[in-house]
């Protein structure tokens, strides 16, 4: 699976998919991807017929729940497997963002207790019944009705107009006037918000947005733009000039009446970004729901391991490579003949002429970053090789590898080390599956893996693949 930058062209390509999704969350809409994609470095990939979006911020990747054009839940589960495999192969920690509430049980059951959940209040979207905005019914909305009536009485020439390209210059002038008042307040995020509003305005036709404006006293005093995805109208832009009391509720009502057709059930007016004034206003319109957006950090049992274990077998001790063995470990790493089949070459990432201690520092860093669990193989206090668990996955799987220095080969140390670390993996780390691979021409490794009880499960032109479960 390969991720690409989610450009405007890609957004247009996936418009039918995004417009068909029915999460009711603004994060999954074309408009949000268009405005915030550049700030969140949004990328996309396709797997199992699903669209997978990924944001990046604070040096961490965050994945959206896969979007199936037809709502195929089985395809979405297979796409989740593809995301997990991507994270495993790329050494990326698995985090999900903006997970809809109805998908939460699926992920909790999938990952069990090995996850951290957050649901940040300022990110929740406000969802309203369409009819309530169209009619402002009953005593609950008497305040909104009074404001609208006052606006209409003050400006008897008021008029709502659906936007057309012929109105572009006048609407742009309105947005520039509104922006000037916002910049004067020096509010946080005002610049980004207005850049987003202008960008959406400039691409109304391209994105196929619904838009309209309110005219009063001979000028445009309010403007709104949104789009329908599933059964929900998402209002991405709603602006009104100060000095025209009632313009906001009048604009919201006219927009709902004119542009929210029979296929629309809800109106999503997005989050409040933690702005208490905006929060108060949105709550006064009596939302039908505040839509949770869950962030999920998936953990592996390995992640909680703070220090390397000591594992004893009949003849061996598997433990952290000691400082006094730095020279021996470096010599093992530098043995090109031994490492022909190891799968990693220190020269690809080491500094020029690294010290012996650098090699120890490297594997200790990998453990600290939870990339692998590296253990030295000791026989009678002598370092004779290394055995590692790495490529930890999110379905309780990992890959095992080993190497034994040439003077110590032929004594069964590889098999014994494999069995010792696999037992630890199954019993202490809770792994369900341990995998391995070996080059076909590497007969000793093939023999060691088979003698340790690993079963073949596939091959390609170069390698043969193996696996073992706790029950085998």
Image: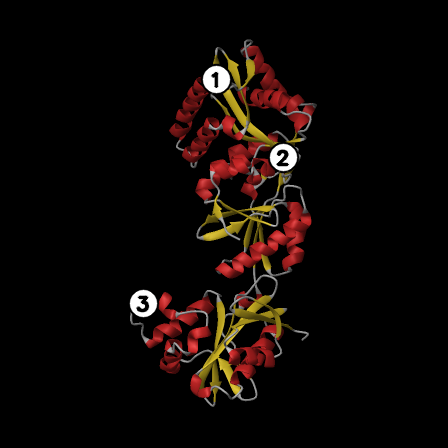
Q: Are marks 3 and 2 in contact (CB under 8 Å)?
A: no
Q: What separation in Å lies between label 1 and label 3 (alpha carbons)?
A: 62 Å
Location of the C terminus (image quadrant): bottom right
Q: Residue 48's x, y, as percent?
A: 61, 50
Q: Are marks 1 and 2 in contact (CB under 8 Å)?
A: no
How many numbered badges does the structure rendering display?
3
At 56% from the left edge and 46% from the top edge, which residue is drawn? 120
Q: Residues within 10 Å of mark 2 (few under 14, many from 20)?
A: many
- Per the image, the residue denoted by label 3 is 351
At 44% from the left edge and 68% from the top edge, which residue is drawn? 366
Residue extending farthest left = 353
**What is the number of the mark on residue 167?**
1
Q: Secondary structure beneath disc 1?
A: helix
Q: Residue 155's x, y, as percent?
A: 54, 11
Q: Nearer the viewer, residue 383 or 462?
A: 462
- Per the image, the residue denoted by label 2 is 127
**Residue 277 falls left or right of residue 340:** right
Q: Residue 6's x, y, as percent?
A: 48, 42
């Amino acid at each position: 699976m390969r991720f690409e930058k989610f450009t405007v062209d890609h957004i247009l390509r996936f418009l039918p998919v995004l417009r068909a999704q029915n999460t009711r969350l603004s994060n999954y809409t074309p408009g949000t991807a268009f405005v915030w994609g550049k700030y969140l470095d949004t990328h996309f990939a396709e797997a199992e017929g699903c669209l997978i979006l990924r944001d990046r911020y604070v040096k961490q990747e965050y994945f959206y729940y896969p979007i199936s054009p037809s709502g195929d839940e089985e395809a979405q589960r297979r796409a989740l497997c593809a995301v997990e495999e991507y994270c495993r192969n790329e050494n990326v920690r698995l985090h999900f963002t903006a997970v809809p509430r109805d998908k939460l049980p699926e992920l909790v059951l999938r990952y069990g207790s090995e996850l951290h959940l957050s649901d940040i209040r300022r990110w929740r979207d406000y969802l309203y019944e369409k009819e309530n905005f169209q009619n402002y019914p009953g005593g609950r909305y008497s305040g909104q009705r009074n404001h609208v009536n006052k606006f209409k009485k003050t400006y008897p020439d008021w008029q709502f107009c659906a936007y057309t390209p012929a109105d572009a210059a006048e609407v742009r002038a309105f947005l520039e006037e509104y922006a000037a008042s916002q910049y004067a307040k020096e509010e946080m995020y005002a610049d980004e918000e207005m850049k987003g509003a202008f960008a959406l305005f400039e691409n109304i036709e391209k994105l196929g947005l619904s838009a309209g404006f309110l005219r009063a006293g001979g000028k445009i005093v309010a403007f709104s733009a949104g789009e329908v995805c599933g059964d929900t109208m998402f209002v991405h832009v709603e602006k009104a000039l100060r000095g025209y009391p009632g313009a906001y509720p009048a604009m919201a009502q006219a927009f709902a009446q004119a542009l929210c057709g029979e296929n629309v059930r809800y109106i999503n007016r997005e989050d409040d970004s933690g702005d208490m004034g905006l929060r108060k206003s949105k709550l006064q319109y009596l939302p039908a729901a505040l839509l949770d957006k869950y962030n999920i950090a998936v953990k592996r049992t390995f992640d909680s391991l703070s220090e390397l274990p000591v594992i004893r077998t009949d003849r061996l001790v598997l433990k952290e490579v000691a400082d006094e063995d730095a020279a021996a470990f470096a010599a093992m790493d530098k043995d090109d003949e031994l490492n022909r089949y190891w799968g990693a070459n220190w020269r690809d990432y080491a500094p020029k002429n690294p010290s012996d201690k650098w090699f120890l520092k490297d594997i200790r860093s990998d453990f600290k970053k939870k990339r692998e669990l590296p253990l030295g193989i000791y026989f009678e206090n002598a370092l004779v090789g290394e055995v590692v668990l790495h490529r930890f996955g999110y379905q309780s799987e990992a890959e095992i590898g080993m190497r034994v220095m040439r003077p110590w080969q032929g004594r069964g140390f590889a098999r014994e080390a494999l069995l010792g670390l696999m037992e630890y993996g199954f019993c202490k780390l809770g792994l369900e599956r341990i995998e391995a691979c070996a080059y076909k021409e590497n007969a000793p490794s093939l023999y060691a893996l088979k003698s340790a009880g690993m079963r073949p499960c596939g091959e390609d032109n170069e390698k043969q693949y193996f696996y073992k479960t706790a029950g085998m």
